[in-house]
Each structure stands twice: as C-alpha cells, then as structure tokens.
Image (spheres, rainbow, N blue to C red):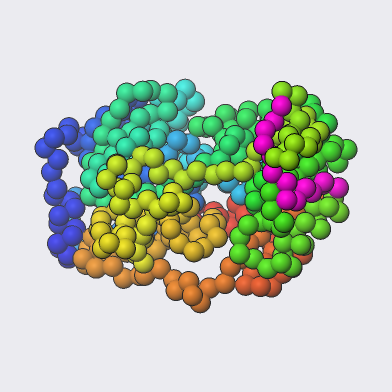
Amino acid sequence: MTGKGLYTMLTKNYETLSPITKLAPRINNPMSFSTNILIVGGAYSGLAALRALKTHLSTKLGTVDNKKKISITLVEPRNGLLNILGIPKAIVNSDFAQTQFIPFNELKDCKFTSVFSNNQDEFTQDYFVEDDDNFQLNFIHGVVTYLDSGKAQYKLNNNDELGIVAFDYVIMASGRDRKWPTTPKAQTKDEFINEMIKSRKDIAANQIISVIGAGAVGIEIAGDIKSEFPDKTVNLIHPHSAFPAEPLTKEFKQMIQNSLERAGVNVYLNTRIAKEDESGNLITTDNKTITSNFNFWCTAKRNNTGILSQDLKTKFVSENNNIFINEYLQLANSNNDKIDNFFVLGDLVELPIIKSAGWAMYMGRQVANNLSSLIFDDKLIEPFIDLSKMGYGMVVIGGNEEIVSDLQGIVELNNKDYVQEYKDYCLGKVRATLDL
C-alpha cells in the first residue's frame, strides 16, 4: 500500500455514528453514515471533481493491493445537471428548456450505487450500477444544512428529518443563488420544465417587461425576451454608466449595449430603482416612474456559505461572502489558518477571476488531481494557475441572439467558434469536458 493517507482514509472509524456498511439501492429517509469523500454540490465544479476523482483514484488503486472500496458521496438538490448557462433562454423558450436539464441517469458514467431520495419521481434502476470494485458512490438528493471540517448535516428535499455524514475529505461546491426564475426551485427535470413554462406564460401575459440589473444574466434575459417576443416593450435598467461590471474593455461594454439597442431593448443607464408599485411600475430613487407590467430583478446573487459552522465563517468567509482559499483551493486565510481536508470550488472562492463554468470545471479537475495525490502520496501537486499571466474574458448573448465576446482584450461580434458552441449554450462542450 502506497502512502499513509490512503491507509488512514480507509480505516478511520466513526464511533459516534452508525456507519452503513451496505447501503440499500434506494433510501427514503436520511441516515447517518461515514464516507471518505463528500462533495457538496453537483453542478459544473462538483461533477468535474466527481468524474476526475473516479479517473485518478482508479489509476492509483491499480497500483496497490487494496480490497477496500473508496466511498464518495454527492449531495445535490437536483437529480441531474442543469446547464445554468442556458437559463435566460430557457425562461422564454420552453422547447429549449427541455434540452438544458440532463438527469443523472442519462449522463455517461454518472450513476450511483445508492440513492437517498424521497422525491416522488421514478428513480429507475438506470440510476444504479452493479458493485464497483473500487467505489461506493452515494447520491443524496437533498441539501446540506450544516458543514464543518469533519461532518455535514443534511436533509432530503421533501423531509425535515436530518442525517449526518462524517467524512475524511470534503469538496464544497455549493455555488450561488439568484432570484427565481434565474435560480429555479426545481428538484427534477419535470419540475424545471414546469417552472420555465410558467415563466414564459408570465412574460407572454404582459406587454411591458423590465429587467433590473445589467449583469450577464440581466443582459441575456433582456435580449432573449426581445428576441422571443419582438412586439413587447423590454427595458433594461442599470444603476451605472456602463455594463457589465466586470473589468473588461470599454469596447466590449459598448458593443453589448449597441447590440441590445439594435434589437429594440430600451436601455436605462445611471438609473437606480427604489421600489416597485402594485401595478408593476418602477419608481426610481429620484422619484421618476418607469412604466412596467412585469419585472425581473437581476440585482443580486448570494453565495451559499450559510451552511458553514460559525467558526469556519468567522475565519474563512470574506466581507463579499466569498471563501478564502490557498493555491490548492484548501480553506486558508492570511492568518495562516488552514484546513487540509477541506476544498472549495467554483463561485464560492475569493479569487480575482470572472466566475464561469469553465473556471468551475477547471477547479474540479485540479482538486481531484490534488486530492488523489494527497490520499496516496501525502502531497499536493498542482497549484492554481498564475492569474498574473491571465487576462479576463467573457462571452454574452446580446440582442437578436448576437454573441459578444472579450477574450484578453480581443472584442468580437459573433465569433464563429462561439456561435457554434452557443447553439446549445455550451452544454455539448460541458459534457465533453466532463466526459459525461
């Protein structure tokens, strides 16, 4: 056996819990058990970590005489991959929405030995696999309600009872939420489609639609509404003189605004909304009224850090509600506090980057590489990329489905590669990158 890390991981006992040595295929109530690796969140970064862990650990396990399985547990409120990149278009196009939620049992090599779920939809046997020589893969269809450096408290989606998962290592990839419908409440594909149908009906029933906040999500919602409903009045309202807020070129920001205005979107700059009245009209901070019937508020996002223990929040959560990490994405701060077994991915990290699906998947692969090496060889081998050598980049859908891109200062309209990728809003690229 190579590395004391593997020996420790596979022989650790949890006397205060009731470990499950053989999980049933479908478990309808939360139970307490132990796992070697816990992944909190199953979107881009969480699935990237899961997929890469299986690959790296399988290779490592082939070099040792080991008969014990590695247990990996994924906790995710949705039973599939929701392509968040496609949400703005899914809000206005129900047929397109059908393509943007892929249940886990339809993804390549993303099946589970055991499933904890009390949802009423059918979990067919396609969710399960025969015993794997190397892994016990568990899926908890629910949410983590508390997380510290050794255990997580969780509940299933439709049950307030709590269970505890003790772990050797944790990968926190719980992401961020926005207001509905840009963060759907759906736990299954059918629920997601129903939400998107409702959202489209809300838009169709109103003549004047306003989007408050011109970040990437607000920009795309405004453009998509106008493309799908060209006869409606669409307003995009932003409190600053240009958008989006990210550190990108003036040329890029102006090109996005021009694209929206060519499509007929009314752009309001330097306009801050104080309140919405009962009829949907918007009252500005200087007491002017913008006539509106239905509004999308895209002014805020919230990182899901509330599950952390108070001690971890105090030490590792920034004023901006990001999480401090080191170059290996381990919990670490400037006071030299560090938790070796705790990794953080995706939107949550305190890094000078524009958060994206690409960065999230990169982090998942990096952490899987480091964690596999840590388990077997007691060392971390891949630091995060040197950001001083990296420029900023962003791709945004403007008006008339035009694609505006800024990659390290090169600004383009309808780059042919992006046009191809955004036919399915990068879902094919995501699946290829994750090998799912």
- Identity of the residue drawn at 69% across and 30% down: 276
**Residue that appears at 37% across and 51% down:** 317
Front-lying residue, 78 or 130:
78
Classify 29 as above or below 356.
above
How many marks do you count on the picture? 0
Is 271 included in the stretch rendered in magenta? yes
- Magenta residues, start to end: 264-277
Percent across and percent down for residue 269 are: 75, 51
Residue 81 vs 94, above or below: the answer is below
- What percent of the width, then of the height, locates residue 257? 77, 56
Which residue is found at the position 31% from the left and 56% from the top? 331
Question: Farthest right residue?
Answer: 231
Residue 132 visible? The answer is: no
Residue under the image location 73 percent in, 50 percent down? 270
Whether residue 203 appears in magenta in the rendering, the answer is: no
Residue 326 placement: quadrant: bottom left
- For residue 330, above or below residue 18: below
Quadrant the N terminus occupies: bottom left
Q: Position of residue 162 (x, y in %)?
A: 30, 27
Q: Is residue 176 visible?
A: yes
Q: Quadrant of residue 416?
A: bottom right
The extreme front residue here reads 286
Q: Position of residue 151 (x, y in %)?
A: 25, 41
